[in-house]
């Protein structure tokens, strides 16, 4: 529910865009544009700001297509201007009431599926991670959804069809109600767990059907034990250091909340690291204090020709022992990427061969634009870099990550999570 309050003729007036259901919206679990346009009132069923061109619907020659958007309910209430909290509580109560009435029965369009024309899907999701202390546990508070059939994570770029999402309970149980008739894939991602899940079999929903998917098991990507990690795998960069805004650009709306929704934060990197790029020491540094929320370029000629250059971050770490003949894995999950190119080097080596990670850079990934548009997430990217054990030292090591694209000041990535895994268990 979006909400505003204002005064009119001595009376406090509130207007709210009340959420009923998000079946017509895409990027529902990750989109940020609805809140980035404050203090305006947006209703954005789809938008490419935080996904890029992948979100644009594409049609084949002669293809027919239609999709119901809405109904949209704008709620106006009024009351004592000194009791704004009452307006807010009243709007929330009305929002709950509207959600309970969904799907509405009054739309006359045959394209709007009535309650009797919809079904439901239930089940329970588990996470099985061989490296965890408890190898199988409930997927607590997982985001579980139905969307067009595809691969893990493909729902985030799909915009042509309907999507239906819910949150699992603490024991991994989920129930998705009021689902339109159709064939779907069942997707999920779990806060605190790396990777995306998709059920191996499609799910068919028919009118009045109640599909029980049973117990489902998500095995997240894993090739060896965790040696160290930076951040939290939650498909967001919110846990990293978001700097104070330049006072010239600061918005008072976001000084105490949503601090990343400030203009010009990308410029703060050069101010915080004037003499060299970021260095993070595992076991000493703290990701919420010492890891900048966006790996951006560095402006070297501000105000003149706005020249920017690539930046190279360092991760320093110690290994008590190394398996020279083993293969280590560096997993890099990105919360967003805008025309970025990441290059990984180990202990000062080149891109490949001796001293390198043995993997080419990932070139010009994405056009999420979340950095420029005051977001904290876009589309998730998962990159794996294989590192031969002979390239690592027993003792001190350094991994260099270069964001090599320098097209402009908005180019860069937001990291979600980084993990180094040892050889296979």
Image (cartoon, rainbow, N blue to C red):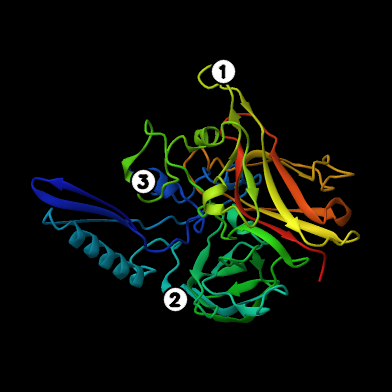
Q: Which numbered circle lies on residue 305?
A: 1
Q: Secondary structure at mark 2?
A: helix
Q: Which residue is mark 2?
A: 116
Q: Secondary structure at mark 3?
A: helix
> Do the residues bearing badges 1 and 2 touch, measured as CB atoms within 8 Å?
no
Residue 151 visible in this rendered orientation of the protein: no
Q: In percent of the image, x 66 and y 44: which residue is there?
A: 61
On the rendered image, what quadrant is the C terminus found in? bottom right
Q: Nearer the viewer, mark 1 or mark 2?
A: 1
Left/right of residue 35 with respect to residue 279 in the rendered view: left
Direction right: furthest residue: 325
Q: In percent of the image, x 62 and y 34: which residue is there?
A: 276
Label 3, label 2: how far apart the Cα atoms are: 44 Å
Left/right of residue 82 with respect to residue 357 in the rendered view: left
Q: Position of residue 43 (x, y in %)?
A: 39, 49
The one nearer the camera, 41 or 361, is 361
Categorize mark 1 by other alpha carbons within 10 Å: few (<14), some (14-19), many (20+): few
Residue 386 location, quadrant? bottom right
Question: Which mark is first along the chain, 2 or 3?
Answer: 2
Q: Position of residue 12 (x, y in %)?
A: 14, 52
Q: Which numbered circle lies on residue 254?
A: 3
Q: Position of residue 262 (x, y in %)?
A: 42, 40
Instruction: Determine whether 127 is above or below 30 in the image.
Output: below
Q: Nearer the viewer, mark 3 or mark 2?
A: 3
Left/right of residue 402 with respect to residue 123 in the rendered view: right
Question: Which mark is first along the chain, 2 or 1?
Answer: 2
On the rendered image, what quadrant is the N terminus found in? bottom left
Residue 319 visible in this rendered orientation of the protein: yes
């Amino acid at each position: 529910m979006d909400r505003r309050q204002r005064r009119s003729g001595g009376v406090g007036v509130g207007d709210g865009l009340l959420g009923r259901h998000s079946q017509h919206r895409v990027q529902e679990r990750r989109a940020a544009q609805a809140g980035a346009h404050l203090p305006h009132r947006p209703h954005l069923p789809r938008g490419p700001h935080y996904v890029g061109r992948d979100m644009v619907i594409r049609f084949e020659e002669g293809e027919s297509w239609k999709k119901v958007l809405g109904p949209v309910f704008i709620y106006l209430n009024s009351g004592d201007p000194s009791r704004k909290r009452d307006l807010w509580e009243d709007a929330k109560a009305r929002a709950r009431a509207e959600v309970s009435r969904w799907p509405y029965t009054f739309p006359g369009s045959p394209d709007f599926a009535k309650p009797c024309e919809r079904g439901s899907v239930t089940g329970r999701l588990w996470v099985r991670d061989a490296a965890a202390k408890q190898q199988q546990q409930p997927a607590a508070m997982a985001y579980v959804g139905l969307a067009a059939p595809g691969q893990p994570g493909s729902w985030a770029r799909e915009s042509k069809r309907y999507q239906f999402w819910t949150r699992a309970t603490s024991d991994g149980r989920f129930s998705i109600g009021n689902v339109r008739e159709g064939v779907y894939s069942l997707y999920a991602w779990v806060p605190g767990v790396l990777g995306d899940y998709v059920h191996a079999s499609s799910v068919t929903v028919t009118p009045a059907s109640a599909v029980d998917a049973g117990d489902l098991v998500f095995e997240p990507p894993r090739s060896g034990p965790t040696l160290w990690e930076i951040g939290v795998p939650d498909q967001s960069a919110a846990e990293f250091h978001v700097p104070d805004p330049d006072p010239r650009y600061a918005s008072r709306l976001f000084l105490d909340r949503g601090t990343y929704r400030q203009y010009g934060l990308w410029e703060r990197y050069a101010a915080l690291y004037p003499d060299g790029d970021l260095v993070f020491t595992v076991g000493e540094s703290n990701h919420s204090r010492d890891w900048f929320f966006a790996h951006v370029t560095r402006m070297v000629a501000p105000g003149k020709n706005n020249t920017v250059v690539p930046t190279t971050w360092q991760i320093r770490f110690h290994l008590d022992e190394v398996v020279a003949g083993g293969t280590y894995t560096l997993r890099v999950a990105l919360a967003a990427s805008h025309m970025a190119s990441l290059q990984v080097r180990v202990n000062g080596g080149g891109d490949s061969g001796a001293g390198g990670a043995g993997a080419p850079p990932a070139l010009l990934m994405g056009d999420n634009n979340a950095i420029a548009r005051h977001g904290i997430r876009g589309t998730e990217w998962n990159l794996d870099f294989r590192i031969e054990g002979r390239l690592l030292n027993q003792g001190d090591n350094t991994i260099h990550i270069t964001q090599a694209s320098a097209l402009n000041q908005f180019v860069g990535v937001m990291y979600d999570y980084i993990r180094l895994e040892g050889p296979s268990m």
